[in-house]
Image: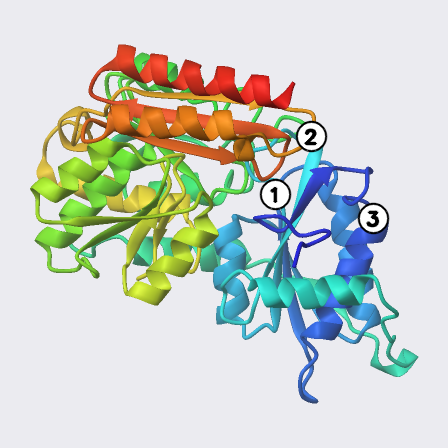
Amino acid sequence: MARKYFGTDGIRGATNVSPMTAEMAMKVGMAAGAYFLRGDHRHRVVIGKDTRLSGYMLESALVAGFTSVGMDVVMVGPMPTPAVAMLTHSMRADIGVMISASHNAYADNGIKLFGPDGYKLSDEAEEAIEALIDGDIPLVPSSQIGRARRIDDAQGRYIHFAKSTFPENLRLDGMRIVIDCANGAAYKVAPSALWELGADVVAIGVTPNGTNINDGVGSTAPQTLAETVVASGADIGIALDGDADRLIVVDETGTIVDGDQLMATIAASWARQGRLAGGGLVATVMSNLGLERHLAAQGLGLVRTKVGDRHVLEKMRSSGYNVGGEQSGHIILSDYATTGDGLVAALQILAEVKRSGALASEVLHRFEPLPQLLKNVRFAGGKPLDDDAVKAVIAQAEAELAGNGRLVIRPSGTEPVIRVMAEGDDPSQVERVVDRICDAVRKAAA
């Protein structure tokens, strides 16, 4: 069943434009609240947000919706998405809400929902909530309207949790770390956690003003971090995105280290310690073939899923893996968290660098990535991938790359675009293959 409001990661869009309006936020609060009203206990919802200007508007609307159906609301203010997931479970809330559009610019916002176990909602739950949004939701009598309050210790709770994931026998003393918080949700908690673990912290992207989230800083714009690491003589740089569920690292030379290298580092460390479950890790179809070959050389496996951290997590849970993620930096460590957590993943990386006594550049560059090329083809309508000529070109490309590369072609889940990605040992061959497919898709879409 096609969903009307929920996408691959909650509801998201430009603020004050449908569906990301105050009216919709209130309806989501009412519908999600009604869906999770089970039993006669006082029901509770935890609401967090990032630093976008529109967060105030959407937070107020959600509070109105939840309280109108009888739910008590606990507001925790600007907090990472994984912190909201953790607090939802630890505070025995019935539902958690994160107001964020992740790595998008400030004009966008979104609503992510978590169940009482701290995991993102299932497709079935989201579909049931959608049905309630478009229906008549009964309001409680005036005597049963919920209460709303802010709590001041949420940041301390999350900092304590994050620090607890760092090895007890290690400290970050003597390490200079640049932390880039993207002017987003982790702008207070991430620098504090690193400092309390002993690091010499240089913090950037920690002056949010409502409109500068992800603006030239953070994991999607790591150049500022790279320049700061080199200029300050730091040992390593850590970049989070707007809601801090994504991580990119920069080594002491200013070289960017992506999610594939970070997952390889954590997997090797955990395998050495006897902690790695499942005999490998879970990644998406976008992870580099170099990662797969590197893991295989160590006797470790790589299971691939569709793009999206929710697909990665589903496979981890169903098949017993405890490390997974995406090349973009979503890294899920299920021993600690129910969703991607940039700070917790960063602490595992820092632990490995500290434990090794070597430079970050020596520890984190685990394999040489294969040449990879991604191009997007925009189309007006129809299904160009169903065209016989396109199918023939794709089949020819797959035969050409067999044994020496890989091809991934998929429609975008958010815009009318076909994404064509190829990788292989021969960069000129990769480029030829991608260009041929793109040309065929354009002709089919004309």
Callout 3 amino acid: Ala
Callout 2 amino acid: Gly
Label 1 sits on residue: 50
Residue 337 visible here: no
Relative height, residue 233 to residue 297 (above, below): above
Q: Residue at x 79, y 76 (%)?
A: 70
Q: Choose the circle earlier in sequence order: 2 or 1.
A: 1
Q: Please rate how many residues cluster around mark 1, counting C-alpha atoms within 10 Å: few if below 14, some from 14 to 19, many from 20.
A: many
Residue 18 visible here: yes
Q: Secondary structure at mark 2?
A: loop
Give the CA separation, mark 2 to mark 3: 31 Å
Label 3 sits on residue: 22
Q: Are marks 2 and 1 in contact (CB under 8 Å)?
A: no
Q: Residue at x 16, y 32 (%)?
A: 366
Q: Secondary structure at mark 3?
A: helix
Relative to 244, 256 lies left or right:
left
Q: Residue at x 48, y 35 (%)?
A: 410
